[in-house]
Amino acid sequence: IGGTRSLDATCGLEDDRRYAFVDAHGVFLSQRRFPKLCLVTPTYPIGGALSLKAPGQPLLKVPVNDEGPTKTCRIWSDSVVAVDQGDDAAKWISDYLKTPGLRLMRFPDKAFRRVDIKYAKRSCETAFSDGFPILLANDASLADLNARLAKNNSSPIPMDRFRPNLVVSGAAAWSEDLWGSMTCNDLELKVVKPCSRCKIPTIDQATGRTGAPSGTDDEGGGPGQAEPNKTLKAFRSGTALAAVDPFFAAPKRKNDVFFGQNLVHFAPGA
């Protein structure tokens, strides 16, 4: 993301992760279940409407609606009451994914979803993200990963495979593992949890193709054995990083792979 973006009080980038597609049971959808979701291109709400484009689909304009019918939606183990964005949007996404009963939901301003208290003791919020409002990645870490991919005769990958909303340059590769906080324009951001990766980094964001199998739901799926996760597992698994920090040494994390850091903030800023 280029340029300057505003942060709201505690919930991340303004209007970021405020929309989600859900299935007929209200469970959020992601590329883990439907890799071709990466080809849905949203346009930041301008003039009170969200625009959506996807291959083979007509342009859809959805008026921003915080006051319509509501539905309880589930993101992992969290439940939130979100606002349904109408039948036109529901038909659009159901047709695109060839799956009946899908809906587009908006996280309204009055909704509240707290981040995991184990990692952020002060009250911090997020919307439809996996768990935290800000995901940081380091350009140098990606360069190191791409160098390792080249040694394995694999193609380099762009940063969008990891879907960060904050990218830093000028730091040493993997130095973010040891960061506790950072300051941007006098705004303090707290680094609270390394990001364990699922299969999404294996999905080419330009084509929707992946070397990892699609799951039947979004409840995990593991990192898979396709690149870049295969290479990451050799040096960025919990087992490989156990000496860096006790966090990585937990037995439940031994097979996870890590790239990037989850951040929170406590005040608005830019």
Image: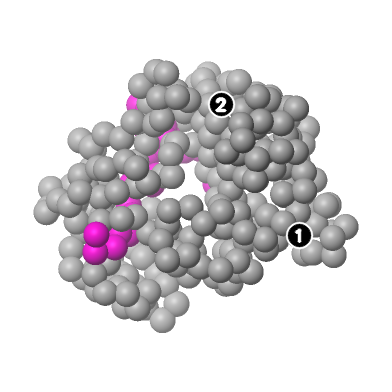
Q: Residue at x 69, y 43 (%)?
A: 237
Q: Position of residue 113 (x, y in %)?
A: 30, 35
Q: Position of residue 133 (x, y in %)?
A: 44, 36
Amino acid on which the number 1 mark rests in the picture:
Pro
Residue 258 in view (yes/no) = no
Q: Quadrant of residue 173?
A: top right
Residue 74 in view (yes/no) = yes
Q: Residue at x 49, y 36 (%)?
A: 134
Q: Within the magenta stretch, is there residue 7?
A: yes
Q: Nearer the viewer, residue 160 or 212?
A: 212
Q: Residue at x 25, y 56 (%)?
A: 26
Q: Within the magenta stretch, is there residue 82?
A: no
Q: Secondary structure at mark 2?
A: strand
- Tell me the CA gap for discs 1 and 2: 27 Å
Q: Position of residue 166 (x, y in %)?
A: 56, 39
Q: How many marks?
A: 2
Residue at the bottom extreme, as displayed: 56
Q: Which residues are magenta?
A: 1-25
Residue 191 is labelled as 2
In this rendering, the answer to whether 91 lies above or below 245 is: below
In this rendering, the answer to whether 29 lies above or below 145 is: below
Amino acid on which the number 2 mark rests in the picture:
Val
Residue identified by numbered label 1 = 156
